[in-house]
Amino acid sequence: MAGMSEKKTDEDFCSEPILTAPNEAEWIRSAQPGLDPRPATSHDGSVIYIWRQHLAAFLANIPSLVTGITIGWTAPAVPILLGQVEDAQPLRLSLEQASWVGGLMPLASLGGALVAGPLAERVGRKGALLLGALPTLVGWLLMAFAGPSVWLLMVGRALTGLALGAVSGPVSLYCEEVADIRVRGALGSLHFAMQCVGLLVVYTLGASLPYFWFTVSAAILPVVFVFSFCWMPESPAYLAACGRVSDAQHALRWLRGPDVDFKAEVENMLASRSQATTHQEISLCSLCSNRPWQSNALRSLALVIALMFFQQMSGICMFTFYLVQLFQQAGGNISSSLSSIIAATAFVISTIAATATVDRIGRRFLLLVSAILMGFCLFTLALYAQLNSDNWDTAGWRWVPLVSVVTYTVAFTTGFGPVPWFLMAELLPMYSKGWASALGVCTNRIIMFIVVKESPLLLEHAGPVATYIIFGVICVISAFFIFFCVPETKGKNKADILKEIGGENA
């Protein structure tokens, strides 16, 4: 009928010109209040608006900062709770209880990981991240005000773990989906980089503040996150997958800039949406029952699960959760707290370096070098521990534990720390991202729980020599796996990556 507009199809949206009005900047400013999108000096939007993608990814990774604090909190807290360090905190734990304080967090994160995929598909990547702030806030407050109650401490620890598991997948998906291909690796690395910053923060606060204050300070971050990230756009890929193509274009205009021609990017999103619609009934069970060895979805999932397994079985959580105690056992010329801060600083610096180089060097090379160096450092620590136990004079070699741990952390943070997380987003097909990323995070948390829960007992009963050798051998095995099985994804779009993996629907 005359005077009534017809409903536009996805193709109509793609055929529209990207610049539709001379006052485009005013329109975007009204869509995202408080953020001026106008370039400062240049009209080259493809360059000048990269900062918006970095801003969105940075704010989305504030939960990753809290994750690092949650993981590293046990390093300064457990010695206090065991009574090894004087503090006003009235609660005292046994070694078994302390191992549960460490292990409960990754165990509870399993529950969060199970709902992370469906939640990210139903409420969006942005919505899932915002919802995770509430259990995080409550959990930290319970841990700070637990007093002599073991149960309040455990419940608080479980809530922080639940939130950690719920946001890990959506963070990786959001960063991968808002990023231009030129900065996809760098923004994907932010997830782990912010975790490393969190470790440095909690080690520093733990060395300088009483238990209560370094615990309650973590409760500030969820509030900061909600009030800053709420202004950021939703993932354009998610919006396109939901059929909200106009909203996806609006988000891309803000992220890329009004002068950037992103028509091809929208068309790729619509193609992914078409594939997702075609495969929307495909579940894990149906894939497994229909020639699973020929499915690129299951091949990609197998790679993701293996990478998550090797990441945690490298032994990294033994160091991040119990670093102060490990330095106490090894001895040295520097205090255990200062050694932990030095190691965490190395974490941060090396992660920044990896973030700057991952799109130039490539993911596969970083993983391979990381695995080899970690194995070497673990075998070095095993040799030093053996010489100590045999009463050799190691007075001139007290620097070996610190140097080995710092080198180990540098190796981890430049490869096996960040790379598996954004490879998860790059390898998985769009139609299986929800449940497949949830399985990847679940695998990560199960192995993390095993390592965190059993490491204190393994160190106590098997000794540090056997413990370091076990993790070192696993690092060597992971290097062979990377060399023969993991594809390079640098500079490739989703279709090219799936073709390299092989299988049907590639």
Image (cartoon, rainbow, N blue to C red):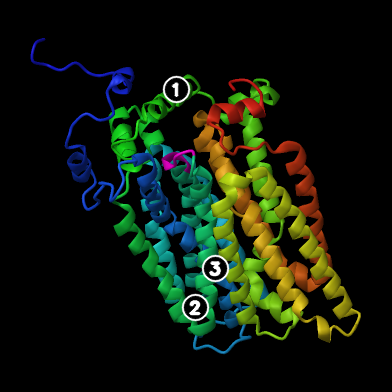
Q: Is residue 177 magenta?
A: yes
Q: Is residue 26 left or right of residue 488?
A: left
Can you tell which quarter of the image residue 93 is in? bottom right
Disc 2, SS: helix
The part of the chain drawn in magenta is 176-181
Q: Quadrant of the C terminus?
A: top right
**Residue for badge 3:** 199
**Residue for badge 1:** 271
Q: Nearer the viewer, residue 378 or 36?
A: 36
Ranked by sequence position, the earlier of labels 1 and 2 is: 2
Residue farthest left in this picture: 3
Measure the C-alpha gap from mark 1 to mark 2: 48 Å
Question: Disc 1 or disc 2, which is closer to the eye?
Answer: 1
Measure the C-alpha gap from mark 1 to mark 3: 40 Å
Can you tell which quarter of the image residue 71 is in? bottom right
Give the residue type that dot 1 points to: Ala
Please name the residue shown 41% across and 59% down the image.
135
